[in-house]
């Protein structure tokens, strides 16, 4: 039969199922197909901390949302247009966020009395009329998959597990996705078991063919490629981009990268990724604890490597004492905090921006460090290079504040030309720097950067001792002199405060905005989308986004004071707003939410519209 | 390989210009002098030697050595030294620590450095007291110890540092005494020659807060009857007249001290530091009584196992050997790996 083809400019699909249903993989593959087609994309995985929560329960639901469009987009989308629900729990957990009129594709095989009861359904929502207002497509996904694989030499369990590929095939057909990359992926993934390659490919094709033949799906959609900057792209998550940024920092500095890390969600993927890149001279060490991880990284920096440690908030708390030592030793160190919802264990797989205070202030004594935050998944690559640049040039710890949203979300990344990446080469001290030509002064500073010499062990004539005790200016000898301590504390503060960072840019296309929205880190997408929405409706609003949180851009005070109102949305209770109010005496309004989920563009748009009305 | 050039360094070359600030009479002076006197033997250029310490009296040590050095934070020296050693296998890395630093706040790092067999020489100065914080009991203080923080006696049992190190399967474990310079240097020599973690406990006298803690092992009247001087390949006998010996009683798990005269010579244990099973050295570590009788000194265990550093560096070298592109070319390839698409 001939199907109608309808053009759309954007679609949001959410794949939801049990954590064992392979929804992350399904979403990932759909995203890759979509990227191949040239749509702009943004994705949001959402999964429980439990590896296998009890099957079929609400806490066990895992989902993956993908937003794709024929124009450039900034977020994974507020609400899905299509929900793929692999079981009753997935339907129940996601229905509230589904706007009326949305398509729901359900795996009817899982809507058994027992599974319904597990999530508190007394009657089947497929039959009791509660889904009126949605376009429901009941599909017997499991049994059709098993049926399609009857002739295949796989166990019933393996056949059943291929149902996610059936779903992927159906959705790929529905949205006219090119699927060659998925077939190649399956060949790679199951290379050791050819019978599973065949089964999964067959399940995928069965799903595709089902879409083509069944009358239930009468419309097929197309989303044309977005117009994007020419170049080669790949889809990348924040954690992967951050890892590659660290590898690139090693290549561009000519230094070995040493990563000390202890497994912690959501940062462990960086350890996994970097452990694969030994050919670049990258050494990874899974340490006995968070403290050892940062200690080993500092020891490696002392020896002339780029020392890095990756963790999440609870780990930063444990590393705090060593970061202070690094402040006193004035050695390069990159600390990556992939933030998650706290305090304590909190919600380890959910996002939050509540470690800003920890990064800025979470140490004993006056212990300033540089702090930067990436604004999107692909931006993590450049943020990692920037963190390394500051650490190496200014011999200081740098905290890189990523979060679960950018770490696990993905977007297309325009691959940079390696030669265009910053030159991070450093000069180790090689000869005595004292006036007499024989003395080495480990705390004699470069007048421009205020950095002290990086004299690594193995350099003859520069043997010296450093430590946590206060050091005399220039000589580095132990000193309890009051004036010297005051001088050293102020110098360490000035070292950070005077790091040149780029001015903050303001996006105010109308030029007459009276309200400025200021953000940092991963809120860039939702804030940007909200501002676009307002502007499309004729309202003026300005947006500025901070990458550098310590030191802050030199022009920030001037920018803030140019607007009648400054609004700061944050996934915390107002940590940046607090800094801005204290530092610039600006009466900034905070908009705060800590639900473990990113802001939606719609809620920010609504909030900002209210602010605009009252200026 | 050509013969290394003799550097002709002396103890003086290892003295830094910093004034030594331990209390007069502290056992640390003797250890410092012994180490500085021993260092020239290594024939390693000073710039390739690094001393890393934690916090405590002993941890001031690096400031007084004219080598590279870091006085770090409490308990973390083994972790910091691990990062240095694994990335710089060309260096000789020494850790100086104390009973509180290594066994209390830093206990975790110590056992993990030992189990990994990181190429570190760890010198634990054990004075069985907290000195720098002015006299609290330490994790090696005897049970019932009366100190400022335990006015009616400590309630917790002490660690036996060597048993702990052997439990972590340290590949080199030894004990020596601050006042016996010759023995101390012989142990340092053996430790320096060892590939992998070398753990050396040094009994050290704190004359201010725990004076005389090891007097029985030092006084001419008692020391010969109390100390067991371990010699690889020699039967273990001790006492002024060799009147005591160590045997492995049938049916027992450990070792016991007997009268030599009443023991057939073939039953006396011949010390073998190379026994693979740490149980033998562990049994030796259990011999001393609370009164320090039967305290073995010397090398308890010295076995060969690949060091963490060498395994990690071999992995990196093998990975590097598999590519013939420049790092920039490799990086361009890495960035473009996975599914890419091009917009023209």
Image: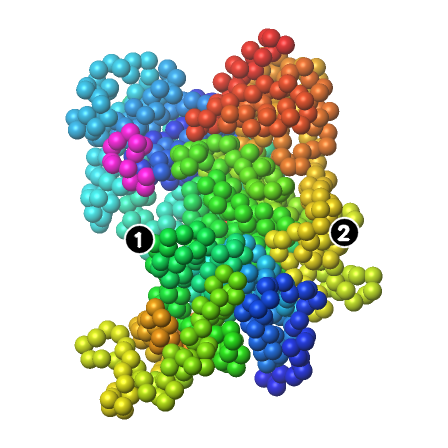
Q: Earlier in the sequence, mark 1 or mark 2?
A: 1
Question: Mark 1 or mark 2: which is in front?
Answer: 2
Of residues A391 and B158, the one nearer the viewer is B158
- Asked if A276 appears above or below A66 in the picture, the reply is below
Image quarter where the N terminus of chain A lies is top left
Picture coordinates of residue B320, whole percent (x, y): 54, 64
Q: CA distance from mark 1 to mark 2?
A: 61 Å
Picture coordinates of residue B212, whole percent (x, y): 47, 69
Which residue sits furthest left?
Answer: A113
- Asked if B280 appears above or below A345 in the picture, the reply is below
Q: Which mark is residue A446?
A: 2
User: Could you say which quadrant of the image residue A495 lies in?
Assistant: top right
Crowd band around label 2 with a 10 angstrom C-alpha radius: few (<14), some (14–19), many (20+) = few
Which residue sits furthest top?
Answer: A613
Please say whether residue B327 is visible from this viewpoint: no
Of residues A358 and A297, the one nearer the viewer is A358
Chain letter for mark 1: A
Picture coordinates of residue B74, whole percent (x, y): 52, 54
Q: Relative to residue A340, is residue A26 drawn left or right? A: left
User: Could you say which quadrant of the image residue A257 lies in?
Assistant: bottom right
Seen at 35% across and 59% down, the residue is B143
Q: Secondary structure at mark 1?
A: helix
- Give yes or no for residue B247 being in the magenta stretch: no
Q: Relative to residue B243, is residue A469 drawn left or right? A: right
Picture coordinates of residue A99, whole percent (x, y): 39, 17
Q: Secondary structure at mark 2?
A: loop
Q: Which residues are magenta?
A: A50-61
**Residue identifier under label 1:** A194
Q: What colour scheme governs how the chains and residues are painted in the rendered image of this protein?
A: rainbow
- Give yes or no for residue A60 being in the magenta stretch: yes
Please say whether residue A575 is visible from this viewpoint: yes
């Amino acid at each position: 039969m001939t199907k109608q083809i309808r053009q759309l400019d954007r679609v949001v699909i959410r794949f939801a199922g049990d954590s064992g249903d392979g929804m992350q993989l399904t979403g990932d593959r759909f995203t890759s197909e979509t990227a191949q087609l040239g749509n702009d994309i943004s994705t949001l995985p959402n999964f429980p901390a439990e590896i296998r929560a009890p099957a079929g329960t609400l806490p066990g639901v895992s989902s993956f949302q993908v937003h794709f469009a024929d124009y450039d987009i900034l977020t994974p989308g507020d609400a899905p247009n299509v929900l793929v629900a692999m079981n009753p729990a997935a339907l129940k957990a996601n229905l509230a966020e589904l706007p009326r009129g949305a398509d729901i594709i359900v795996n009817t095989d899982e809507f058994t009395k027992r599974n319904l009861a597990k999530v508190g359904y007394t009657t089947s929502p497929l039959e009791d009329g509660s889904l009126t207002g949605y376009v429901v497509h009941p599909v017997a996904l499991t049994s059709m998959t098993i049926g399609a694989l009857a002739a295949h030499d796989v166990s019933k369990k393996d056949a059943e597990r291929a149902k996610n590929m059936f779903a992927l095939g159906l959705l790929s057909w529905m949205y006219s996705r090119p699927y060659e990359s998925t077939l190649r992926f399956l060949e790679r993934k199951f290379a050791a078991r050819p019978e599973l390659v065949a089964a999964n490919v067959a399940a995928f094709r069965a799903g595709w063919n089902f879409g083509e033949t069944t009358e239930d799906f009468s419309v097929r959609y197309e989303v044309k490629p977005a117009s994007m900057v020419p170049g080669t792209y790949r889809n990348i998550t924040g954690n992967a981009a951050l890892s590659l940024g660290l590898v690139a920092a090693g290549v561009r500095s000519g230094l070995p990268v040493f990563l000390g890390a202890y497994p912690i969600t959501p940062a462990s993927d960086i350890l996994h990724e970097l452990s694969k890149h030994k050919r670049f001279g990258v050494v990874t060490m899974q340490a006995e604890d968070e403290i050892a991880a940062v200690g080993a990284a500092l020891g490696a920096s002392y020896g002339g490597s780029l020392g890095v440690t990756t963790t999440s908030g609870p780990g930063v708390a444990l590393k705090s004492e060593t970061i202070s030592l690094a402040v006193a030793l004035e050695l390069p160190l990159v600390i990556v905090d992939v933030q998650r919802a706290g305090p304590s264990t909190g919600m380890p797989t959910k996002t939050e921006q509540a470690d800003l205070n920890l990064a800025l202030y979470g140490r004993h004594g006056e212990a300033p460090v540089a702090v930067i935050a990436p604004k999107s998944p692909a931006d993590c690559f450049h943020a990692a290079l920037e963190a390394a640049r500051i650490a190496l040039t200014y011999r200081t710890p740098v905290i890189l504040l990523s979060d679960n949203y950018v770490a696990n979300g993905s977007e297309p990344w325009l691959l940079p030309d390696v030669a265009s990446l910053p030159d991070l080469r450093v000069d180790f001290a090689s000869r005595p720097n004292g006036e007499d030509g024989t003395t080495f002064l480990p705390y004699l500073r470069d007048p421009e950067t205020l950095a002290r010499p990086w004299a690594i062990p193995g350099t003859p004539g520069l043997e010296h001792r450093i430590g946590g005790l206060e050091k005399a200016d220039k000589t580095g000898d132990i000193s309890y002199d009051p004036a010297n301590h005051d001088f050293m504390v102020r110098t360490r503060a000035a070292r950070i405060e005077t790091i040149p960072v780029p001015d903050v840019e303001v996006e105010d296309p109308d030029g007459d905005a009276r309200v400025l929205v200021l953000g940092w880190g991963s809120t860039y997408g939702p804030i940007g989308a909200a501002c676009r929405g307002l502007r499309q409706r004729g309202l003026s609003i300005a947006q500025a986004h901070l990458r550098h949180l310590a030191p802050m851009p030199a022009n920030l005070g001037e920018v803030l004071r140019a607007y009648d109102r400054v609004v700061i949305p944050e996934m915390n209770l107002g940590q940046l707003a607090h800094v801005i109010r204290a530092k610039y005496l600006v009466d900034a309004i905070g908009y705060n939410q800590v639900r473990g989920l990113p802001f939606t563009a719609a809620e920010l748009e609504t909030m900002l519209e209210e602010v605009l009305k009252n200026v | 390989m050509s013969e290394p050039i003799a550097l002709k360094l002396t103890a003086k070359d290892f003295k830094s210009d910093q004034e030594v600030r331990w209390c007069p009479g502290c056992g640390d002076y003797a250890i410092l002098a012994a180490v500085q006197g021993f260092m020239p033997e290594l024939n390693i250029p000073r710039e390739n030697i690094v001393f890393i310490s934690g916090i405590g009296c002993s941890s001031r040590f690096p400031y007084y050595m004219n080598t590279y050095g870091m006085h770090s934070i409490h308990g973390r020296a083994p972790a910091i030294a691990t990062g240095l050693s694994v990335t710089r296998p060309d260096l000789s890395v020494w850790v100086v620590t104390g009973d509180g630093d290594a066994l209390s706040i830093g206990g975790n790092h110590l056992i993990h450095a030992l189990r990994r067999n990181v190429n570190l020489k760890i010198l634990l100065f054990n004075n069985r007291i907290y000195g720098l914080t002015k006299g609290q009991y330490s994790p090696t203080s005897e049970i019932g110890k009366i100190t400022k923080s335990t006015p009616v006696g400590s309630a917790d049992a002490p660690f036996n540092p060597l048993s702990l190190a052997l439990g972590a399967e340290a590949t080199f474990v030894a004990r020596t005494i601050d006042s016996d310079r010759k023995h101390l240097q012989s142990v340092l020599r053996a430790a320096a020659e060892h590939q992998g973690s070398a753990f050396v406990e040094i009994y050290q006298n704190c004359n201010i807060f725990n004076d005389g803690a090891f007097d029985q092992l030092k006084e001419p009247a008692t020391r010969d009857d109390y100390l067991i001087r371990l010699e690889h390949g020699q039967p273990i006998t001790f006492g002024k007249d060799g009147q005591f010996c160590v045997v492995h009683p049938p049916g027992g798990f450990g070792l016991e001290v007997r009268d030599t005269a009443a023991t057939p010579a073939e039953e006396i244990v011949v010390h073998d530091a190379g026994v693979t099973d740490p149980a033998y050295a562990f049994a030796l570590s259990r011999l001393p009584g609370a009164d320090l009788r039967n305290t073995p000194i010397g090398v308890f265990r010295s076995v060969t196992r690949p060091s963490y550093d060498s395994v990690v560096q071999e992995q990196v070298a093998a990975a590097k050997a598999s590519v013939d592109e420049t790092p920039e070319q490799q990086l361009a390839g890495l960035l473009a790996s996975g599914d890419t698409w091009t917009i023209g």
